Image (cartoon, rainbow, N blue to C red):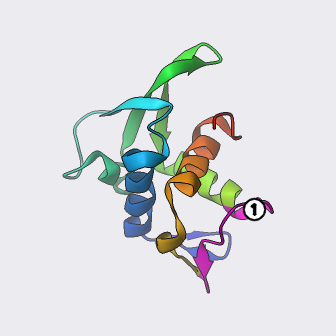
Amino acid sequence: MRIKSYKISNEDIDDIVCTAFEGGINYWCNKVTPVGKYLGEYASEQISRNGSLILHLIEPINGINEYELNKEKLIQGLTMYLENPYAPYEITCGDCIDTCNVDADVADMIIQYALFKEIVLG
């Protein structure tokens, strides 16, 4: 799969979502549940397999407590991060995404862009 001029693999998607769940979004999201059954062994594998997850917020945003994350939204969030001239880290290497540079803060930003289309927390 390509976004902009970058290749992104299912493993890249899994890595970004895993990083978000293991520390990036924990200050605003306290529970993640699959839509339907798990498509992989872990929740972080759901998105790359074209599934969806419901993220349950600690405090509502705009009166909403739950947001659905899917592959399309994640790709949108990643694209927004890549287009942000003030993004804290370069996460590309050549024409690929380098998930070694995606730390908890970057993963948080990607997920927030995916769900809210802007950074609203943190």
Q: Most extreme residue toward the right, as rendered?
A: 85
Q: Residue 122, located in which quarter of the rendered image?
A: top right
25 vs 64, nearest the viewer: 25
Which amino acid does the dot numbered 1 rest on? Glu
* Residue at (47, 25) in percent of width and height: 57
Assess whether residue 87 is covered by the magenta stretch: yes
Q: Position of residue 113 (x, y in %)?
A: 64, 45
Task: Name the secondary structure under disc 1.
Answer: helix
Q: Is residue 88 visible?
A: yes
Taking 54 as reference, is 114 above or below it? below
Stretch in magenta: 82-95
Question: Taking 5 as reference, is 31 left or right?
Answer: left
Q: Mainly helix, strand or loop, the magenta region?
A: loop
* Residue at (36, 45) in percent of width and height: 51
Q: Is residue 8 visible?
A: no
Q: Position of residue 29 (x, y in %)?
A: 45, 31
* Residue at (60, 71) in percent of width and height: 91
Residue behind mark 1: 83
8 vs 110, nearest the viewer: 110
* Residue at (51, 61) in percent of width and height: 103
